[in-house]
Image: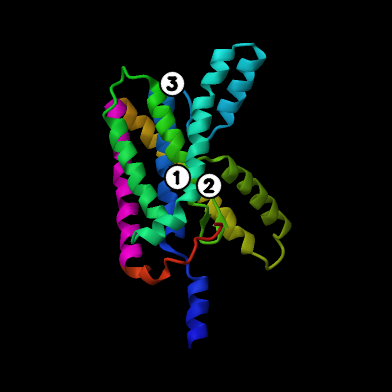
């Protein structure tokens, strides 16, 4: 009986690994993308490839000060990854909740603060803040029910859709349909990211900087769910790590 319970716990997906949680997170990320591009300097802060390219271009053009500037968002992203790597174990051993849950609370506080920033403020404030929380989110939420997922950008999902379509063609006449589930999951993530970007564009035009407060609703749903899981449903599973960690 004890062995069966242990096996059940191993196959159980924690609440922070559920697909719908990842769907909401990538909707928020799509919103952030529209927000930073439309209102905060025409940049995408969810990933750093663009900043590294721009830094390289500045170095190539011998614009040293401009090149040094890009160290700010890159460092913020790096710091976010470091924090999210260091904190999970200490948090669950000193608090009653997981790091994943605390991260959502931190994200909500950052979003709340960003909504109060006037349009005349330097765009770097919002850029660095979103760099930081996007990095932590990307490094914390890694697998949705056993499938590696990115919750802050769409590039990997597009790649995986391409891979999945090839597998569908190759196995069209066979009974192997296992790849289709993974293909569908990545397609769903791409659609939800797009939906978040659309919502962000519409709301930013209507409410300008305060539009970012709209993300407090979906993040609040996640926070409430994760708190319930940590304090009640999964209280005895605090030592179980989310897959991919």
Q: CA distance from mark 2 to mark 3?
A: 24 Å
Q: Quadrant of residue 208?
A: top left
Q: Circle 2 — which element?
A: loop
Tell me where the magenta segment starts and ends, as one range: 206-231
Taking depth in this image into account, of 175 and 221 the one nearest to the observer is 221
**Residue closest to the eye, 22 or 236:** 236
Based on the picture, tell me whether residue 21 belongs to the magenta stretch.
Answer: no
- Residue 124, image x, y percentages: 41, 23
* 210 within the magenta span: yes
- The secondary structure making up most of the magenta span is helix
Crowd tier of the residue under label 3, counting other residues whose Cα lies within 10 Å: few below 14, some 14–19, many 20 or above? some
Left or right of 23: which side holds 54? right
Name which residue lies at 37% across and 34% down: 200
224 relative to 125 in the view: left or right: left
User: Tag 1, which secondary structure?
Assistant: helix
Q: Look at the picture and state if 175 lies above or below 120.
A: below
Q: State the image coordinates of residue 102 (x, y, percent, origin top left).
A: 36, 51
- Colour scheme shown: rainbow
Q: Which residue is mark 2?
A: 150
Pick out the residue farthest to the bottom: 1
Position above or below: 236 against 69: below
Which residue sits furthest top?
Answer: 62
**Of marks 1 and 3, the one in the foreground:** 3
Residue 26's tag is 1
User: Badge 1: few (under 14), some or many (20 or more) residues near its Cα, within 10 Å?
Assistant: many
Tell me where residue 120 appears, x and y as whole percent.
31, 17
Residue bearing mark 3: 41
């Amino acid at each position: 009986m004890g062995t069966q319970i242990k096996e059940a716990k191993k196959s159980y997906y924690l609440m922070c690994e559920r697909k719908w949680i990842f769907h909401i997170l990538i909707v928020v990320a799509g919103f952030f993308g529209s927000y930073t591009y439309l209102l905060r300097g025409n940049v995408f802060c969810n990933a750093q490839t663009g900043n590294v390219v721009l830094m390289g271009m500045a170095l190539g053009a011998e614009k040293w000060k401009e090149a040094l500037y890009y160290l700010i968002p890159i460092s913020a992203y790096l710091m976010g990854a470091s924090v999210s790597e260091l904190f999970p174990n200490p948090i669950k051993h000193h608090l009653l909740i997981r790091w994943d849950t605390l991260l959502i609370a931190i994200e909500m506080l950052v979003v709340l603060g960003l909504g109060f920033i006037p349009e005349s403020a330097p765009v770097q404030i919002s850029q660095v803040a979103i760099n930081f929380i996007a990095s932590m989110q990307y490094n914390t939420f890694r697998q949705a029910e056993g499938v590696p997922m990115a919750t802050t950008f769409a590039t990997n999902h597009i790649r995986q859709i391409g891979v999945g379509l090839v597998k569908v063609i190759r196995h069209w006449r066979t009974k192997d349909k296992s790849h289709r589930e993974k293909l569908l999951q990545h397609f769903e993530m791409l659609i939800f990211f797009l939906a978040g970007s659309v919502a962000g564009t519409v709301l930013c035009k209507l409410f300008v900087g305060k539009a970012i407060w709209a993300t407090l609703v979906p993040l609040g749903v996640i926070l409430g769910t994760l708190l319930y899981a940590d304090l009640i449903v999964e209280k005895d599973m605090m030592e179980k790590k989310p897959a991919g960690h």
